[in-house]
Amino acid sequence: MPVDILVLGATGFTGRLITRYLYNHPQRGAFTFAIGIRSRSKGEELKKSLGLDDSVKIVQVDVNRYEDVEAAVKETKVVINVVGPYWIWGTNVVRACAEHGRRYVDLSGEPHFMKKIIERYDFVSTKTGAIIIPGCGFDSIPADLLVFLSNRTLKNALGPDAQLGLSQTFYSMKGGISGGTLATLMTEAEIVPKYKLLEAQKDYAVSQARGRPSPPPAAAVRMPFSSQYGAYFPMAIPNRSVVQRTFGINALIASYGHLLFGVDQTKEKEAELRPLVYGPEFRYAEYLTVGSSKLVAVVVSTFAKLLLLLVFNFAPARWLMKMFMPKPGQGPSDETMEKGWMNITNYTECASSPGVWAKSVMRGQGDPGYLLTASMISEAALGLVLDDASLPSSAHLGGVLTPSTGLGGVLINRLKATGRIQFESEIVRADEESRKDR
């Protein structure tokens, strides 16, 4: 009997959090899950340490061996893959899910990996009905869902033909860092070919449609309707890639809905799909909120870019980072993670009604990269298992999708229900009049 969810990489730091989250979930009786681990003895140790009963099965699988992965995937409905770096370990898992029509979520913040799996497995996924959704954690659920929410708010206020213009997301947070995150950074610096990194970082590199160029990099950007400034944000490029893929998927489906869904459903589907289109003037950027000082923003941007320059170009800098940073499998304590938080704000201007903006906010209590990420990816997987009838039309076409095109409002509702995460969206005008759209 196939299990509903298979957690690959359950013994890693984030994998343990996900396993614990699923085991204690309020809907636990509605789904089954297993942990996929290379060593059965380590699986037994994990079950004992987390107090898991025999309802949680152990699946022995080596992600390096496609035969192992394929056998495990065949007996699963949805795979949660937290075996990273994905450039090294992720391809076999995506391939098996794509070829066998399964559903897949991961925590990839690697545009080069996303580009690779799109080129290899997007088409076959549309044929088998597989749903592949990379970036289902802090990278890149907040970015993708907040633009999705701002678009919905603008369309509800101004009509389905409202066009999006400049969209900016500002991040404010407190959280720790795990060894797995650092291992991904080292992989990008040491193993991924540089030309692959550069190709994947280009505007619309993973989108089926091209839009307006992104705003040029800036050391300090003032937040709309605020005295706060944003600085360079290292995860802006991976998040932008996901948002731009959403832009492309929605544009493509809206243009060819009559072919994808059949002539008989054209009117109904047009009414559903037209409001999802962001429009040709859409452009996107992200920043780290640093306070009301422009100088501080410039200093933070300069320091962050210099640090990345050193890591990517000088081996001694990477050696020092490895010496003093957590090893894979390590991360913040539970007490420290509970003290974390995030407050992420998106402002999206309506290009067809200048001066009218949507302001959408996502708040969370807990370390965003770990506690909240465990909630996000788990709820994404549960949405694919339990809420199939409510998924967006784009999900039922299959392919390499994004959080909003694969899950959309289903994921927003699930995250709200966790009690840790809140969403808010409103119209903001130059005259400071606003209207809530929750």
Image (cartoon, rainbow, N blue to C red):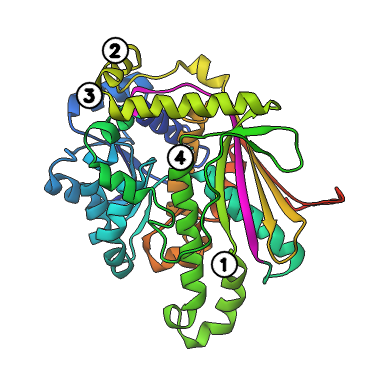
Q: Residue furthest bottom?
A: 263
Q: Earlier in the sequence, mark 2 or mark 1?
A: 1
Q: Which mark is residue 42?
A: 3
**Which label lies toward us, 3 or 2?**
2
Label 4 amino acid?
A: Gly
Residue 280: mark: 1
> Which residues, given as a range, are shown in magenta?
163-180
Q: Name the residue rendered at 39%, 40% in the picture.
A: 107
Based on the picture, tell me whether residue 172 belongs to the magenta stretch: yes
Residue 152 vs 344, above or below: the answer is: below
Task: Find disc 4 in the rendering and name its residue.
Answer: 137
Marks 4 and 1, how far apart in space?
28 Å
The residues bearing labels 2 and 1 have C-alpha atoms spaced at a distance of 47 Å
The image shows residue 95, relative to residue 26, as above or below, that is: below
Q: Which residue is tagged 2?
A: 323
Q: Nearer the viewer, mark 4 or mark 1?
A: 1
Q: Does the magenta-highlighted stretch encompass residue 73?
A: no
- Residue 117 rendering spot, x and y as whole percentages: 28, 54
In this view of the protein, can residue 29 be seen by the observer?
no
- Between disc 2 and disc 1, the foreground one is 1
Callout 4 touching callout 1 (CB < 8 Å): no
Sequence order check, earlier mark of 3 and 1: 3
Which is nearer the N-term, disc 3 or disc 2? 3
Identify the residue at horizontal 52%, vertical 74% (top origin). 254
Q: Point out the tag, 3 or 4, that comes first from the N-terminus.
A: 3
Please give the label number shown on residue 332. Answer: none
Q: Nearer the viewer, mark 3 or mark 4?
A: 4
Where, by quadrant of the figure, is residue 311 drawn? top left
Name the kind of residue labelled 1 in the image: Pro
Marks 2 and 1 close (CB-CB < 8 Å) = no
Of label 2 and label 4, which has the lower sequence position?
4
From the viewer's perspective, tell me whether residue 381 is left or right of residue 424. left
